[in-house]
């Protein structure tokens, strides 16, 4: 199977290709054409045509086609690259190159389908009820009969996509419905979702001129970020730091998502263990919305022990086993290196390791490695490991007085707060460290699709501004 | 994951056996001549004369052919760092004006090579390989690339003058570029690149009748795209011939450049560095899968593709190995220096009847710490 680059509707076979192999067997799975950054820069001179192609359709029509695309993506047999791909093929290929268990690949597929199938509701929620044609024309009347104007900031959204979590693709799915094209650099190990999604969209009637797929090395990502006026990148804390404050780049890095337990409910901690386990371990613990720390003022040792009892025995299973919960680290040496880092953190004063008694955490395979769930306990927020995040089920239970919690938690993509104390609730609502706040026992991993995650895509792609016309001039 | 480049069928004219034998005989004789020069007290440089005292053989009498140079222990590039650089000046050239050229140097003390006339000789010989049709004599040149302590600026300027033209220069400081990347200052990097491109476009639009150019692949991309944004092309801006260099010269990049950037201008890739001089390439054509094969300027310099573990053994033709460089000019003797690059051993070409190398890229064991293709 060969996945060519896709240059706004035109497949492009490169002389240079990477070979993707099965993480366990090393058997070839696919070849992916590799292009250079300059090819992206050159194509971007025609980026305006991507939006123009979308604007030839009615916005409602685009939404309907995306809904059809969702169905095709989840259930259809599509031509992806040079091969017909069924949903089962997709799941096996994605699992083979990412190390994610097949059950998790299927779950992510459903998640993507849900977003596309509900695109009308999603847009309504994201735009707070604006008529969709406003994004096509640039202005219009909102429900209060007031003229509003939304100016597109870029004809395309550049995407530098990750390999670690196929779940993140839901973030960019509404972009086409907003009349903005896509320029994607697929993740090196996970080209599957963008390629299949593009195939489904085109099959459903979305203009192929609106979509670009540019697999390649880091210079492709750098080019996308340099030439697209709006782009999204997924990366490490270093990447986040590099693009912080750049209004043209929305950067998604580690989430450091947390569960914060108030003094008023902490004595009932056992009631929330299921929610905690789900937050830590769902989707292989790979997402930025997985919980990496649980903060409370007391009972922290018991909470850590209870979590260890539930998560400690989870073991490595074959990727096609329906009970498989752990994803492999497919880069040779990555699991071992990560474990080395964790071991260093666990050795610090004030840190204990309750999952230790459930056997070795590092499992090394011939070509890859796994890390079994780790629950650590910190007697204060001071040890370095208290603020760590890793790409597997890893959680630190941190002992900290409630009064100091919000000063010390640091950046928190999702904060689930367990408290009925109005004063603490108010402080949580005001805490600018927390991005998405769940008040009550909602797992950090549970997304309300009708609320935006990490900033509203519309605010990023469009500028809301005043547009005035003389009295009597018609505004549709 | 691995990178696969399309299969390479020998569609070029392979050198005949007699030519290969003759070239080898010339190299053997040249090696003997160079030993007589570098190790004679009246002509050799202080470094080698001193070093000879530690050797268990006499280079003047016991090097009878090129292969005998293997008797020398591996050359250590650390010897090239720091002063006094005069230790490298042969007594035979004492008192002549000397240049010092540096390589690397983003951090720490750079490696340096002293030159009297070598860079001129290298580029005069290279000049003979340039097709007249695309690099017409008398044409003016644009040098868009690293200058400062590197020898490129003077070399390209000399090449232009040697061919009867004048060279216009735009400077780029590669050490600052590497620092910008290391600091993650990508906006500054982009702005600096644009600063260079703007100057180049100004020169091309100023009526200087520039037809030939040296530039690096990254700058060539930016220049072509910059011109395209103005509704023109490299060819329409007057450029007919481009000479370029760098390890990021991959077949795919070359194909992209030929198909989409050059608009019919001719481009010849080169592989070179301060130690070796300049290796020309055989013609790069679609039928050869855009394979880029370089041939060292023998007998002044020799490239061997050697086994990663046994660096005195060349790999079979088509095999992958590390680049081993030997420089044999009167100004410089460097025996068996293991470069920071690797590639595939290529058959001798009719025009260059000795081994070549293709697929040049950073040596795998050093690749992660090497910043390439940045300017």
Image (cartoon, coloured by chain):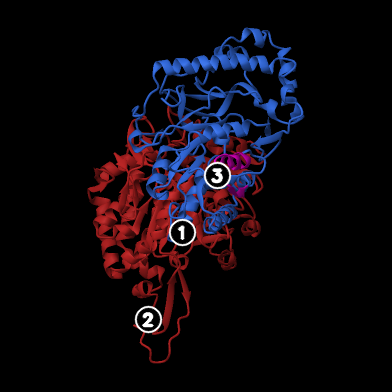
Q: CA distance from mark 1 to mark 3?
A: 20 Å
- Chain whose colour in the figure is blue: B
Q: Which residue is mark 2?
A: A143
Q: Chain of mark 2?
A: A
Residue B368 quadrant: top right
Q: Which residue is mark 1?
A: A228
Q: Which mark is residue B374?
A: 3
SS for callout 2: loop
Q: Is residue B162 magenta?
A: yes
Residue beneath the point at 58% across and 52% down: B189
Q: State which mark lies toward you, 1 or 3.
A: 3
The region drawn magenta spans B152-172
Residue B368 sits above or below residue B54 on the image = below
Q: Colour of chain A?
A: red
Query: Going by the image, does B14 lie left or right of A420?
Result: left
Q: Taking the image as drawn, is residue B75 in sight?
A: yes
* Mark 3 crowd level (few <14, some 14–19, many ≥20, 10 Å Cα): some
Q: Earlier in the sequence, mark 2 or mark 1?
A: 2
Q: Chain of mark 3?
A: B
Callouts 3 and 2 in the same chain: no
Q: State which mark lies toward you, 2 or 1.
A: 1
Callouts 2 and 1 in the same chain: yes
SS for callout 1: loop
* Mark 2 crowd level (few <14, some 14–19, many ≥20, 10 Å Cα): few
* Image position, residue A148 (x, y; %): 43, 79
Q: CA distance from mark 2 to mark 1?
A: 33 Å
Residue A425 quadrant: bottom right
Counting labels gives 3
Residue B125 quadrant: top right
């Amino acid at each position: 199977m060969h996945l060519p680059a896709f240059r706004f509707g035109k497949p492009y076979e490169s002389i240079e290709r990477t070979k993707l192999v099965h993480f366990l067997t090393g058997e070839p799975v696919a070849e992916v054409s590799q292009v250079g950054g300059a090819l992206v820069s050159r194509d971007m001179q025609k980026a305006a045509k991507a939006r123009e192609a979308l604007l030839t359709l009615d916005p409602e029509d685009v939404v309907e086609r995306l809904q059809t695309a969702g169905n095709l993506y989840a259930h259809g047999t599509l031509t992806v690259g040079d091969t017909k791909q069924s949903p089962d093929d997709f799941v096996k290929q994605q699992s083979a190159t990412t190390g994610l268990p097949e059950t998790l690949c299927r779950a992510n597929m459903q998640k993507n389908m849900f977003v596309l199938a509900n695109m009308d509701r999603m847009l309504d929620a994201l735009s707070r009820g604006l008529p969709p044609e406003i994004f096509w024309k640039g202005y219009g009347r909102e429900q209060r009969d007031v003229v509003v104007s939304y100016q597109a900031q870029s004809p395309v959204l550049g995407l530098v996509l990750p390999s670690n979590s196929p779940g993140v693709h839901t973030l960019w799915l509404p972009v086409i419905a907003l009349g903005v094209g896509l320029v994607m650099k697929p993740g090196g190990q996970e080209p599957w979702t963008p390629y299949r999604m593009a195939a489904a969209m085109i099959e459903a009637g979305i203009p192929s001129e609106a979509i670009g797929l540019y697999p390649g090395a880091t210079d492709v990502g750098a080019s996308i970020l340099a030439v697209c006026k709006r782009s999204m990148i997924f990366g490490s804390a270093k990447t986040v730091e590099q693009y912080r404050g750049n209004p043209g780049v929305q950067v998604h890095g580690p989430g450091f998502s947390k569960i914060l337990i108030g003094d008023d409910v902490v004595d009932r901690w056992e009631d929330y263990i299921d929610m905690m386990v789900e937050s830590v371990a769902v989707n292989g613990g790979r997402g930025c919305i997985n919980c990496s720390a649980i903060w409370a003022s007391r009972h922290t040792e018991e909470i850590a022990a209870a979590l260890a009892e539930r998560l400690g025995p989870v073991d490595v299973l074959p990727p096609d086993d329906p009970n498989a919960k752990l994803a492999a680290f497919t880069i040779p040496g990555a699991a071992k290196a990560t474990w080395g880092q964790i071991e260093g953190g666990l050795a610090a004063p004030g840190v204990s390791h309750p999952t230790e008694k459930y056997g070795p955490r590092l499992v090394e395979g011939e070509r890859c490695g796994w890390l079994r769930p780790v629950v650590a306990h910190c007697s204060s927020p001071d040890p370095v490991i208290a603020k760590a995040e890793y790409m597997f089920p890893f959680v630190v239970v941190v002992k900290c007085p409630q009064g100091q919690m919000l000063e010390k938690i640091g950046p928190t993509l999702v904060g689930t707060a367990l408290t009925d104390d109005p004063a603490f609730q108010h402080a949580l609502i005001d805490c600018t460290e927390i991005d998405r706040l769940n008040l009550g026992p909602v797992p950090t991993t549970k997304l309300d699709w009708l609320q935006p995650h990490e900033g509203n895509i519309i605010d990023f792609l469009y500028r809301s501004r005043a547009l005035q016309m003389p009295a009597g001039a018609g505004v549709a | 994951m691995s990178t696969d480049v399309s299969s390479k069928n020998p569609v070029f004219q392979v050198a005949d056996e007699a030519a290969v034998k003759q070239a080898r005989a010339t190299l053997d004789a040249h090696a003997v001549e160079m030993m007589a020069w570098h190790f004679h007290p009246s002509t050799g440089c202080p470094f080698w004369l001193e070093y000879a005292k530690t050797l268990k053989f006499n280079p003047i009498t016991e090097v009878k052919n090129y292969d005998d140079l293997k008797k020398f222990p591996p050359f250590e590039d650390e010897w090239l760092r720091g002063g006094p650089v005069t230790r490298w000046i042969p007594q035979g050239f004492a008192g002549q004006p000397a240049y010092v050229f540096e390589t690397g140097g983003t951090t720490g003390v750079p490696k340096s090579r002293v030159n009297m006339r070598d860079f001129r000789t290298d580029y005069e010989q290279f000049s003979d390989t340039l097709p007249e049709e695309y690099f017409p004599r008398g044409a003016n040149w644009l040098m868009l690339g690293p200058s400062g302590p590197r020898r490129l600026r003077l070399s390209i300027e000399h090449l232009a003058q040697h061919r009867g033209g004048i060279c216009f220069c735009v400077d780029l400081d590669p050490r600052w570029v590497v620092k910008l990347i290391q600091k993650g200052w990508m906006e500054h990097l982009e702005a600096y690149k644009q600063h260079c491109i703007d100057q180049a476009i100004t020169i091309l639009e100023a009526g200087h009748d520039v037809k030939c150019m040296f530039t690096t692949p990254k700058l060539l991309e930016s220049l072509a795209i910059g011109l395209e944004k103005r509704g023109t092309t490299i060819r329409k801006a007057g450029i007919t011939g481009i000479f370029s260099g760098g390890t990021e010269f991959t077949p795919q990049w070359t194909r992209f450049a030929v198909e989409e950037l050059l608009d019919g201008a001719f481009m010849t890739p080169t592989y070179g560095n301060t130690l070796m001089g300049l290796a020309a390439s055989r013609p790069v054509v679609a039928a050869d899968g855009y394979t880029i094969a370089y041939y060292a300027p023998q007998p002044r310099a020799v490239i061997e593709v050697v086994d990663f573990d046994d660096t005195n053994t060349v790999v079979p033709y088509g095999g992958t190995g590390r680049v081993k460089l030997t420089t044999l000019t009167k100004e410089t003797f460097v025996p068996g220096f293991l470069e920071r690059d690797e590639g595939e051993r290529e058959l001798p070409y009719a025009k260059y009847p000795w081994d070549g190398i293709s697929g040049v890229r950073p040596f795998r064991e050093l690749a992660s710490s090497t910043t390439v293709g940045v300017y």
